[in-house]
Amino acid sequence: MNRKNFVIQTKDLTKTYKQSGKARDVVKKVNLAVPEGCVYGFLGPNGAGKSTTMKMLLGLIKPTNGEISILGTPFVSQGKTPFNEKKRLAILKQTGSLIESPSYYGHLTGRQNLEIICTLKNVPTKEIGEVLSIVRMESQQDKKAGHYSLGMKQRLGLAGALLGHPKLLLLDEPTNGLDPAGIQEMRELIRSLPENYHMTIMVSSHLLSEIDQMADYVGIINKGQFIFQDSLLHLHEHSKKQLRLRTGNNNRALCVLNENKIDCTLDKDFLLFPEISDEKTAFLISALVREGIDVLRIEEYQKSLEEIFLSLTGKQVSL
């Protein structure tokens, strides 16, 4: 990435736990760089270290080692206690978060829950109407939170995170457990925040399709290790388009095409070609037909984001 303004930066961020007398790195030397004004997708399988990393960014977990800078201010240095508690609190006042499941008082209404958060954040209650409008739950604000659907509880948690007009929003698996309609609504809402409210969003997920439809930038973590960080566009560049061709006799077709100096390889039931022009495609089909070889199927192929992920992390990863 060549953008200069990073809202989150970490250097060798590490968290080690001891289990049965053995040290285990849950997060290993992660170097985050989250550009200002983007939706940053933090992608990885369950148990990869996403939640632990986000908790360290919020000061909920003390890093074993490494450095954290948020909104241009050093937050943790070399695993020590934050050097200045006042500066730490100042950073958190500009940060909203929804980590794991949202917390709420079930016997209180949605609005009453937000009023409590306003008191805790020292935010004027007049902001409640605005955040309710953002998450589209004005008509549900006087209903008891315990009677909300899972999607409404997620929206309530997001509304609480938005109080105080944070510059940075950290969302941990915000679409978890939602139905397809709820996932789409949450995705559209997250996408709208940077442009409409000048926020930077870091959103974690194990759902590749969600990150693909939400994020501008992507960081991939697997078994605590950072394996990729760049724009979503560059992630997709790991998958070049190919032409796939199936014929009535692939072995003979391969010989014919090689004789015509057409570069291709045989992979199982298909002949694979690098991305080629329409003219060259027409030429190779004509060459096969002249030799009496039946062309059964021709298609353009590009790796899915899941296949790219598996190629980066190793086939042993299961999502």
Image (cartoon, rainbow, N blue to C red):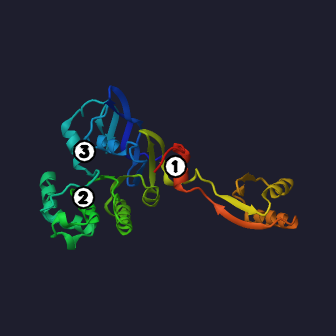
The mark nearer the N terminus, 3 or 1, is 3
* Mark 3 secondary-structure assignment: helix
Residue 258 in view, yes or no: yes
**Which numbered tag is attached to residue 91?**
3
* Mark 1 secondary-structure assignment: helix
> Label 3 sits on what residue type?
Ile
| Label 3, label 1: how far apart the Cα atoms are | 33 Å
Residue 28: image x %, image y %?
A: 40, 34
> Label 1 sits on what residue type?
Phe
83, 313: nearer the viewer = 313
- Mark 2 or 3: in front is 2
* Mark 2 secondary-structure assignment: helix
Q: Residue furthest top?
A: 21
Residue at image x 52%, y 55%?
305
Residue 59: image x %, image y %?
A: 25, 40
Residue at image x 78%, y 64%?
248
- Where residue 82 sits, quadrant-wise, is top left
| Label 2, label 3: how far apart the Cα atoms are | 20 Å
Q: Horizontal placement of 274 versus 93: left or right?
A: right
**Which numbered tag is attached to residue 309?**
1
> Label 2 sits on what residue type?
Gly
Mark 1 closeness class: few <14, some 14–19, many ≥20 residues within 10 Å = many
